[in-house]
Image (spheres, helix red, strand yellow):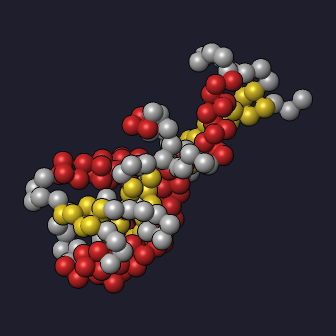
Amino acid sequence: MISWLLSRPGFAVLYVLVIMEVETRRILHCNVTMHPTVAWSLQQFREALPGDRQCKFLIHDRDSIFSLSLDRDLEGFGLRVLQTPVRAPQANAYCERLVGTLRRECLDFLIPISESHLRMSLKEWVRHYNEGRPHMSLGPGFPAHDADNNNKERAVQRLRTGSRHRLPIRCRVRAKPILGGLHHEYTLEKNAA
């Protein structure tokens, strides 16, 4: 699933391309440009879809950037390109939800100064979205791959407490600020002896 998002730093329109894997809810790629072209979009797909990932379908809306030539090039990646019906946002509900979340959790509280500032902020938010923000649709879980040790440690920490409302002995909660304190990621940390 892919989606475009507009941002207006300095009264210039910036386009944000977001590519998400629906099964895991993981954001595979996110980038910013002032002038989206077919060549730029194709390069973003090259970066987002490495050879080891077995994606079958690509769902996109009917934005003019998704030309027939881009769709043909994407089919060369082994993807079946599906366009959403006209005026049917529910057909691309996962991306619509992702764009809403991105706006509510990041862009509504941010005034990007430049294209690179927006790119840097989105990179930090995407890492938080994939690795530090629980998703109820995942049980609650994190979109980052299950083999990630960080996710396993967090699950083990949750189980060790014995109670939902008590901290383990000699532990404290550590808050890590994200986007300058807009969000926080919490972990258990052992106190020094």
User: The N terminus appears in which quarter of the rendering?
Assistant: bottom left
From the viewer's perspective, is 7 left or right of 162? left
Horizontal arrangement in the rendering, residue 157 relative to residue 132 (left or right):
right
Where 36 sits versus 192, above or below? Answer: below
Which residue is found at the position 27% from the left and 67% from the top?
Answer: 80
Marks counted in the figure total 0
- Judge from the rendering whether residue 127 lies leftward or rightward of residue 60; answer left or right: right
Residue closer to the observer: 6 or 64: 64
Q: Quadrant of the C terminus?
A: top right
Q: Residue at x 60, y 42 (%)?
A: 151
Q: In this view of the protein, can residue 65 be seen by the observer?
A: no
Residue at position x 42%, y 34% in the image: 136
- Tell me where residue 113 sits by quadrant: bottom left
The image quarter in which residue 67 lies: bottom left
Please state which of residues 117 and 127 is positioned toward the viewer in this rendering.
Answer: 127
Residue that appears at 63% across and 39% down: 152
Q: Is residue 130 visible?
A: yes
Question: Where does residue 41 sit, x and y in percent of width and height?
Answer: 34, 76
Residue 83: x and y in percent read 18, 63
Tell whether 176 sits left or right of 30: right
When the figure is inspected, residue 85 is found, relative to residue 36, above or below; the finding is above
In the displayed orientation, state which residue is furthest to the left: 86
Up/down of 105 relative to 57, above or below: above
Q: Position of residue 89 (x, y in %)?
A: 17, 51
In front of the other: 53 or 46:
53
